[in-house]
Image (cartoon, rainbow, N blue to C red):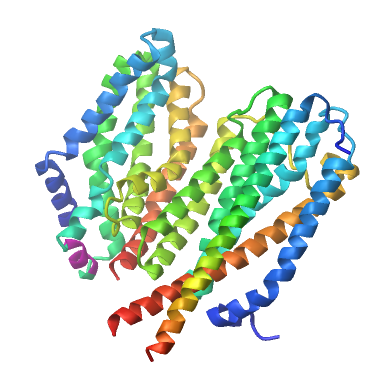
């Protein structure tokens, strides 16, 4: 399983898409927002948590279809499915690899972009924490969507349509933590709920994803 | 009366539909016309809401069905996953567009009702928002069905999507509740007499709900039969090409 | 015959119009597809029978 993890991360890095692309996309989305809504500091700092969360969500979405599609094309997915490693574990590892190559850089980069969005200083800590707690759920849900659409050519758009509604709870709680943190309100309740959503998806969704993959490979 | 699973046989199901569909359809039309005419022409205006109260005869039944159609799809998906009855999977597929249309009706009538009452077409109220999310789930489900060529794989995948989607729909419902307090009033139909709508509106509303439910049943029967026939046609064509 | 709807006539009538249109469209599409599916099946079945 560790081998799968390192292999996926290495592939993502070699392809040059992994760390760089999602991060660059995140940056561009955040940079474009002030052009659209105007450079007023007060407005920007109010919407900053939401914009940063939306940017992270879209950046995550961007690289989802590659989780399984490439392996499906060259046949290594069939090999993985017949290998002694349980498919659930494979899915979990692939989601983890996706998180390390996409989610983790977003978490690290978020404070820098927070500066661009003139996020209040108190908000930085909670923004990073909310992203760190929430993005694993995004990757796991994304892996489920990718497993659903793995057999479909040009499934990218369908993938977004399927995955985005599933992102709603994570987005609500995550953005709420970041917003409450930035305005100095109580963050405990939304943070606990966000953590609960993440725990449940990370624990249960790989089983659904693996079942879906088996159906697709049959 | 034999077991309900006999209807899992597509031939038997089609024959049953042939018998059942005309009376159900006639009843549905009767109930709908009665309920709507009764509601539209023969009920008084509400003292607070004026004549807009008449929208209730469309809004409440369609909203009820929008949720229950998804519930029915969930049950049908479970039956397909556990017992692998093709009719069940096809019934789930047949119900999805009906549920989606019901969701649209509930949203549109709600918006039209909200404009004079709350002074806005749309508010990010928990109930409204959950319905919008439900509509997105319907769209995803229908899109997934139509994207996959192999029938059995499509049935499998959409069933799992329906299960996972249900869990996330409930999660979203609570998340949205947490996120914003609502304008929307409580349930219009509950066992608690106090918060119920007045009797004058209650009985025509019940008739309308009955009409919508019958309409839903008729449409699902009809569309399931269509799906069965379409699948049989595909199978025959495939066999023809083989020989 | 038409009841007095007062100042909300537009809202009430348009919501009835939209809903009824949508329902009629849904029913029409379902019926049309049902008829087409039945016809396609009949054609194929006859051809299969003829060809043995």
> Residue at image x 38%, y 92%?
C52
Q: Is residue B28 visible?
A: yes
Q: Quadrant of residue B210?
A: bottom right
Viewport quadrant of the C terminus of chain A? bottom left
> Residue at image x 79%, y 53%?
B33
Vertical order, B111 against A85 (above or below):
above
Q: Is residue B197 visible?
A: no
* Residue B84: x %, y % from top left: 47, 75
Residue at the outermost bottom position: C52
* Residue A96: x %, y % from top left: 26, 48
Vertical order, B54 against A73 (above or below):
above
* Residue B40: x %, y % from top left: 82, 41
* Residue B168: x %, y % from top left: 49, 48
Residue A24 shown left or right of residue A172 in the figure: left
Number of labels in the image equals 0
Q: Nearer the viewer, residue A13 or B124?
A: B124
Q: Main secondary structure of the magenta part?
A: helix
Q: Nearer the viewer, residue B148 or C15?
A: C15
Q: Which residues are magenta?
A: A76-81
Q: Quadrant of residue A133?
A: top left
Viewport quadrant of the N terminus of chain A? bottom left
Please tell me whether residue A155 belongs to the stretch shown in magenta. Answer: no
> Residue at image x 86%, y 50%?
B203
Q: Nearer the viewer, residue C19 or A180?
A: C19
Vertical order, B12 against B207 (above or below):
below
> Residue at image x 67%, y 86%?
B2
């Amino acid at each position: 399983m560790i081998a799968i993890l390192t292999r996926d991360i290495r592939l993502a890095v070699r392809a040059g898409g992994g760390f760089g692309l999602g991060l660059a996309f995140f940056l561009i989305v955040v940079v474009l927002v002030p052009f659209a809504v105007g450079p007023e500091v007060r407005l920007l700092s109010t919407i900053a948590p939401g914009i940063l969360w939306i940017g992270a969500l879209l950046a995550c979405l961007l690289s989802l279809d590659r989780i399984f599609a490439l392996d499906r094309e060259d046949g290594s997915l069939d090999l993985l499915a017949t290998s002694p490693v349980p498919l659930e574990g494979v899915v979990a590892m692939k989601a983890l690899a996706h998180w390390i190559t996409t989610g983790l850089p977003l978490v690290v980069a978020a404070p820098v972009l927070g500066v661009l969005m003139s996020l209040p200083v108190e908000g930085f800590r909670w923004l990073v924490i909310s992203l760190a707690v929430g993005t694993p759920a995004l990757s796991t849900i994304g892996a489920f969507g990718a497993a659903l659409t793995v057999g479909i050519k040009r499934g990218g758009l369908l993938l977004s349509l399927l995955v985005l509604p599933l992102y709603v709870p994570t987005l609500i709680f995550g953005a709420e933590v970041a917003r409450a943190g930035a305005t100095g309100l109580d963050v405990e309740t939304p943070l606990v709920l966000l953590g609960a959503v993440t725990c449940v998806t990370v624990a249960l969704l790989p089983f659904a994803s693996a079942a879906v993959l088996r159906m697709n490979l049959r | 009366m034999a077991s309900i699973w006999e209807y899992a046989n597509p031939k038997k199901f089609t024959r049953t539909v042939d018998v059942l569909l005309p009376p159900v359809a006639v009843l549905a039309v009767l109930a709908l016309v009665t309920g709507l005419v009764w509601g539209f022409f023969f009920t008084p205006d509400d003292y607070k809401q004026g004549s807009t109260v008449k929208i209730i005869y469309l809004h409440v039944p369609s909203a009820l069905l929008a949720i229950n159609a998804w519930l029915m799809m969930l049950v049908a998906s479970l039956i397909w996953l556990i017992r692998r009855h093709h009719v069940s999977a096809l019934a789930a597929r047949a119900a999805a567009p009906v549920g989606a249309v019901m969701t649209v009706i509930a949203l549109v009538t709600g918006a039209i009702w909200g404009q004079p009452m709350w002074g806005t077409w749309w508010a990010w109220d928990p109930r409204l928002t959950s319905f919008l999310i439900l509509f997105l789930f319907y769209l995803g489900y229908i899109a997934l069905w139509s994207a996959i060529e192999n029938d059995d794989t499509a049935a499998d995948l959409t069933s799992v999507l329906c299960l996972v989607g249900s869990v996330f729909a409930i999660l979203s419902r609570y998340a949205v509740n947490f996120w914003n307090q609502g304008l929307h009033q409580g349930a219009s139909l509950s066992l608690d007499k106090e918060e119920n709508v007045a009797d004058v509106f209650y009985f025509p509303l019940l008739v309308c709900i009955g009409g919508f439910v019958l309409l839903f049943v008729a449409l699902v029967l009809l569309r399931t039969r269509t799906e069965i026939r379409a699948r049989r046609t595909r199978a025959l064509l495939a066999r023809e090409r083989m020989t | 015959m038409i009841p007095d709807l007062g100042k909300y006539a537009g809202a009430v009538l348009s919501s009835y119009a939209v809903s009824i249109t949508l329902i009629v469209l849904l029913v029409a599409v379902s019926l049309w597809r049902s008829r087409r599916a039945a016809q396609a099946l009949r054609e194929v079945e006859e051809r299969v029978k003829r060809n043995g």
